[in-house]
Amino acid sequence: QRNVARIVADGARLLGPASGDQACGEIGDGRMLEPEELRDELIAHFQPKCLAGRRVLITAGPTFEAIDPVRGITNLSSGKMGFAIARAAAEAGAVVTLVAGPVHLPTPRGVARIDVRSAEQMLAAVLPLARSHDIFVATAAVADWRPAATSEHKIKKDGTGATPALAFVENPDILATVAHLPVAERPWCVGFAAESHDVVRHARDKRLRKGIPLIVANHGPSTFGRDDNALVLVDADGERELPRSDKLRLARALVAEIAARAPRAARTVA
Ligand code: CTP
């Protein structure tokens, strides 16, 4: 303990200890971090701290809208891009909150994660957090519609071949809701536009429609579930391409672009 205190006082950054099974048979603090964790910590340490002191709120993944207790509608978003942005923002020194739909991804180190399922739950998680964050990055592929009613019991076939009539209602637009909060409560908003055609034209329209300063366009079908992506940043000044690369590299480049654009307002962490 004394040696550790001395090392920290000398200005060195300590990685670990991790907690768990010890060689001596005890369980608790004292393990070496896993080699992959040490590698990631080192890489993170040497990233530019362009978001130091800022709070970033991110939505990621799909949403799942229940039809009955065993089925629902969702989409092909894997959450990988949003999780990569969360990791890149944390590496850049931000305090990061990640609101995630149903995905199978580990939480990036140092990121606070809130798991939700439906669009309504995502909105309910995001809204109270918006005012305490400086930047909001909406990467979630929120389901546009949900079933008008969720059956309490599993809907059964009745043997006649009749199919259930499903009616839908529109989900709340989480990004637009945050973007229209009063100015003093509103983080600087970044949207994503997943399109299947005319990517940039749709992104330009969407940026204006949602009232946000920056939208990041990508081609949905060629990125969902993959480890790489290509992005086009669309803001009031025009477009800028971030060429195809793995999602973490792209996320780091995007974080640098966001840091350069988002005003360092009074909303920064004390
Ligand atoms: N978004 C959101 N809430 C919704 C729908 C979308 O927060 N209910 C956000 C997404 O996270 C993304 C942006 O809005 O940042 C655009 O999402 P996208 O699905 O591309 O667009 P839509 O608004 O659904 O428009 P359209 O269906 O016409 O493409």
Image (cartoon, rainbow, N blue to C red):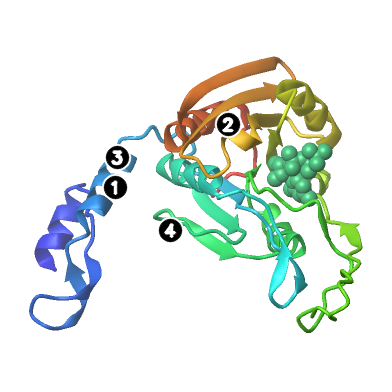
Amino acid at dot 4: Pro
Quarter where residue 134 is shown: top right
Contact, mark 2 vs mark 1 (Cβ under 8 Å): no
Pointer 2 or 4: first along the chain: 4
Q: Can you tell which mark lies on residue 121? A: none
Measured Cα–Cα span from mark 3 to mark 4: 18 Å
Residue at 90% across, 59% down? 169
Q: Position of residue 159 (x, y in %)?
A: 84, 80
Q: Position of residue 44 (x, y in %)?
A: 33, 42
Identify whether 151 is placed above or below 220. below
Identify whether 65 is placed above or below 28. above
Residue at 55% across, 50% down? 78
Residue at 76% across, 81% down? 154
Q: Can you tell which mark lies on residue 41? A: 1
- SS at circle 3: helix
Measured Cα–Cα span from mark 2 to mark 1: 22 Å
Pointer 1 or 4: first along the chain: 1
Pointer 3 or 2: first along the chain: 3
Q: Nearer the viewer, residue 110 or 167?
A: 167
User: In the rendered image, is residue 245 in sight?
Assistant: yes
User: In the rendered image, is residue 185 in sight?
Assistant: no
Pointer 2 or 1: first along the chain: 1
User: According to the image, label 4 marks what residue?
Assistant: 106
Amino acid at dot 2: Ile
User: According to the image, label 2 marks what residue?
Assistant: 258
Q: Can you tell which mark lies on residue 43? A: 3
Q: Position of residue 46 (x, y in %)?
A: 30, 35
The residue at label 3 has a CB less than 8 Å from ligand 1: no
Measured Cα–Cα span from mark 3 to mark 1: 5 Å
Amino acid at dot 3: Ile
Mark 2 packing: few (<14 Cα in 10 Å), some, or many (20+)? Answer: many
Contact, mark 1 vs mark 4 (Cβ under 8 Å): no
